[in-house]
Image (spheres, rainbow, N blue to C red):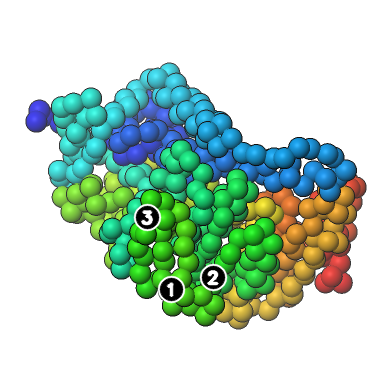
Amino acid sequence: MNQPERYDAIIIGAGQGGKPLAMAMAKKGWKTALVERKHVGGTCINYGCTPTKSLIASAQAAHEARRAGMYGIKTGEVSVDFQAVKGRKERIVEDFRHSIETAFDKTENLTLIYGEAWFTGPKTLAIRLNEGGSQAITADTMVIDCGTSAKTPTLPGLDSVPYLTSKTLLELDELPTHLLVVGGGYISVEFSQMYRRFGSDVTLIVRGSQLLEHEDEDVATELTNILEAEGITVHLNSDIQQVRQTGTHALEVLLEADDVAQVNGSHLLLAIGITPNTAALNLAAAGIAVDEQGFIVVNDKLETNQPGIYAIGDINGGPAFTHIAYDDFRILQQNLLEGSVAATTNRQVPYTVFTDPQLGRIGLSEKEAQQQGKRVHVAKLPMTSVARAIETDHTNGFMKVLVDADTDLIVGAAVLGMEGGELMTMLQIAMLGKLPYTRLRDAVFAHPTLAESLNNLFSKLA
């Protein structure tokens, strides 16, 4: 291999943090190399937010068409053209990729290299180029943004059974007749509802006592009831004893559970968590420390134990959300390019689960507040008491907000309801501005918007 080509900065992975950081560095005049294994855009564009929310939109359209009669609208029998649904999703993904590549092409000082990279020394990479051959590069500043992959559990019989991950499920050409979903997290509930609305039978197999183990029990129970009302079967407290294939698109899962001993389906989706994409990087050659799960260890400035080497996005073991990866970019941009001092300390971590209704979350849950010994008041309002939800016939769920008993400041919220993510964001803005809940309780909001429900929600605390 030739003498390594020197850059001012090297970024491994063109994800939602690596992409804008590479462009920002290049625009500052840094000679920057961006190495990407396959597709620009990271998990979000290729296997996460963009394709799944595109599919969810199609599933929502099918669901609303089936219930058009509730609004006095007559339609014929609703059917799903799954190839057309998939084609729409793929066009949107390709448009996003093309847009990113075009932006890279127009950026001076930026070189995009497609290939598999690994460390050969503290600040040196070898790259197996996708087009053939190899290349070596080096830089004093390096950023790792390689993301994560789906975790595979150890299950008896799994090695002889075809199974899907959240990535490979998106590549299916046919609609599963009966989708078995292992896992009770955010990916599991989104995919379960989506494929049920496309027309698949769906069974959720959950090891724990509730869906969404990190959420409050009342939130998890309400979402479970919503999914079951749509025809999704949910088995809680269920340990898988064995999986086996009984025919073409025929699977059998044996369980140790309270309510059932065996479930059968056509396809098996494993959604039990993520694992970092660190194995191929040869981090030991650079002396980069990882934790017991393989995530790269960083400080609050996102720097590894090796000075000048940083890790951003999901691979550093922080909250696995696109907006957190983007905030990681902003921290490095400020610290490396603008001479500021930014850190991950005390940053808010909002998120939305894109079920219908959405679950928007910010701050503490009631369970977490209790564990921390905080004195809080809890305001709760069912969506059946929200005018806009009633008028549009989207009354599933409820709003729940935690208020500090001493300061009247909002410290957490769970909005499981129509446009829950947007309502949660309003509450987040109030938290950012340190507004006491009374300002929202007494505010004049336009009628009939979802926002005005905050008047009634906070009146519960009066």
Label 3 close to label 2 by CB (< 8 Å): no
Determine whether label 1 and label 3 are within 8 Å by CB.
no
Q: Nearer the viewer, mark 1 or mark 3?
A: 3
Q: Which residue is mark 1?
A: 255
Residue 428 in view of the camera: no
The residue indicated by pointer 2 is: 235
- Mark 2 closeness class: few <14, some 14–19, many ≥20 residues within 10 Å: many
Give the residue drawn at x 55%, y 37%.
82
- Which quadrant holds residue 274? bottom left
Q: In what element is the residue under mark 1?
A: strand
Q: Badge 3, how many Cα within 10 Å: few under 14, some, many 20+?
A: few
Type of amino acid at the residue the image marks with label 2 = His
Marks 3 and 2, the one that precedes in the sequence: 2
Which is more N-terminal, label 3 or label 1?
3
Left-right relation of 173 to 11:
right
Q: Which residue is mark 3?
A: 247
Foreground residue, 27 or 82?
82
